[in-house]
Image: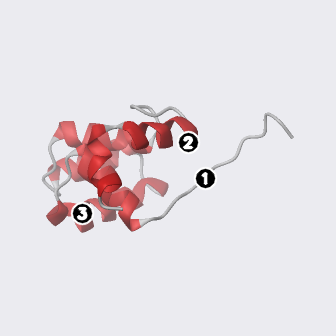
Amino acid sequence: STGSEFVLKVNHRRLLDAMFQACGVSAEDFTAVCSSVDKLDKMSPAKVAEELINVKGQQASVVKRLLDLINDQGAAGDARSTLKWMQTSEEFAFVRDSE
């Protein structure tokens, strides 16, 4: 039926790598940042941001970009526009070029 809402969850390491890198997370920090992001099901975004900044040493601007992208409040908006943005964004060129 039209107008139905649904949630699409994607767990793909390469996509996460690309998202994190585009937001400014270094490859060395991937695992630490992932462990905090995984807590978003149990903790508020504000608490996760606090942990990423104060415990994991991420810059506030990186954390904001990351949480905006995850929460679809940043460059995306919905799944279709997120995918379109990723296909055309220069920040994701390294993913397209490696295929």
Q: Answer few, some or many: residues within 10 Å of disc 1's Cα (few below 14, many 20 plus, some between 14 and 19).
A: few
Q: Vertical placement of 42 versus 92: above or below?
A: below
Q: Amino acid at mark 2?
A: Ala
Q: Amino acid at mark 1?
A: Leu
Labels 3 and 1 touching (C-beta < 8 A): no
| In front: label 1 or label 2 | 2
Q: Residue 41: x, y in percent?
A: 49, 56
Q: Nearer the viewer, residue 10 or 53?
A: 10
Residue 30: assigned label: 3
Labels 1 and 2 touching (C-beta < 8 A): yes
Q: Residue at x 15, y 65 (%)?
A: 28
Q: Answer few, some or many: residues within 10 Å of disc 3's Cα (few below 14, many 20 plus, some between 14 and 19).
A: some
Residue 79: assigned label: 2
Q: Nearer the viewer, residue 4 or 85?
A: 85
Q: Is residue 95 left or right of residue 81?
A: left
Q: Residue at x 33, y 50 (%)?
A: 19
Q: Earlier in the sequence, mark 1 or mark 2?
A: 1
Q: Residue at x 43, y 36 (%)?
A: 85
Q: Nearer the viewer, residue 39 or 84?
A: 84
Question: Which color scheme does this rendered protein use?
Answer: secondary structure
Look at the image and tell me in which quarter the N terminus lies: top right
Quadrant assignment, res 3: top right
- Taking the view exactly as shown, the residue that stands out farthest to the right is 1
Q: Residue 26: x, y in percent?
A: 16, 57
Q: Residue at x 83, y 36 (%)?
A: 2
Q: Residue 74: x, y in percent?
A: 39, 31
Could you tell me which secondary element the residue under label 3 belongs to?
A: helix
Could you tell me which secondary element the residue under label 1 belongs to?
A: loop
| In front: label 3 or label 2 | 2
Q: Amino acid at mark 3?
A: Phe
Q: Earlier in the sequence, mark 3 or mark 1?
A: 1
Badge 1 is on which residue?
A: 8
